[in-house]
Amino acid sequence: MNLKKILAGAVAAGMLWCNCAVSAAALPQKQSPMRDITTAELVKDMGIGINLGNTYESCGDWIAQWGDGTPESYETAWGSPVITQQMIQGYADAGFDTLRVPVAWTNLMGDNYTISDSYLSAVQEVVDWARDCGLYVILNLHYDGGWLANFPTDKENCMEKYKRIWTQVSDAFADYDDYLIFESQNEELGWESLWNRWGGTEGKAESYALVNEINQTFVDIIRSSGGNNPQRHLLISGYN
């Protein structure tokens, strides 16, 4: 689901944050405590959002073949420039309040589904820039080459990969405050092999049950991790 749907109905009015030129010391810090607010209150405060699209969710075997093995080779593979702090400042200066950062975490992934340190660091740098601007950040697992389509036929391996990704991401961002939201997945939770939604109801319950299982696994991982994650606000992916 895209950010327009996520933030539909959220008001744009309210305080606009200072731009990134302001000292980060004057802004809410990512290690600060979680606020005592409801998710509905948080969504209202999130205001207008924009995607950092076609950057860290870019994927494809051809990138590894023709790129130079750096995060930047993926960041630019789908036509986007290398992201800079000035670009993030531009979003804040334009009046955006929330930045969604879609990520294909298997890019440069090592053995045992280990996320690349360099890739994680590149994503984390963007998150930090956004937070230093006072922006909310939605961080997710986004498409990622479509491997989640294999859940019905290779559930054990897919679930292990999914768990490993979110365990590592939640650990890396555990101390960030509630201006960081995790999103369980995007667009991929739904399988024609289980249920043809245009052809009746056979398999519908099974397909929805698998979506719910994956989303519950996401919640369980985040809630059982450290730092601020037991109280972190989460965005749950709907069917397809």
Image (cartoon, helix red, strand yellow):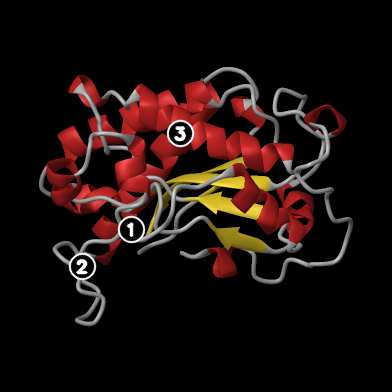
Amino acid identity at mark 1: Tyr
User: What residue is disc 1 on?
Assistant: 208
Please name the residue shown 69% across and 50% down the image.
89
Q: Dot 2: within a 10 Å radius of its alpha carbon, few (fewer than 14), some, or many (20 or more) residues?
A: some
Q: Position of residue 147 (x, y in %)?
A: 20, 48
C-alpha distance separating marks 2 and 1: 9 Å
Q: Earlier in the sequence, mark 2 or mark 1?
A: 2
Q: Earlier in the sequence, mark 3 or mark 2?
A: 3
Q: Out of 14 and 239, give the one closest to the viewer.
A: 14
Indicate which label's residue lies in the foreground, 3 or 2: 3
Q: Position of residue 227 (x, y in %)?
A: 62, 19
Amino acid identity at mark 3: Ala
Residue 85 visible to the viewer: yes
User: Above or below — where is 198 with respect to 127?
Assistant: below
Q: Secondary structure at mark 2?
A: loop
Please name the residue shown 71% across and 48% down the image.
39
Please name the residue shown 43% across and 37% down the image.
218
Q: Out of 217 and 178, give the one closest to the viewer.
A: 178
Q: Earlier in the sequence, mark 3 or mark 1?
A: 3
User: What residue is disc 2 on?
Assistant: 195
Q: Which numbered dot is residue 122?
A: 3
37 to the left or right of 118: right
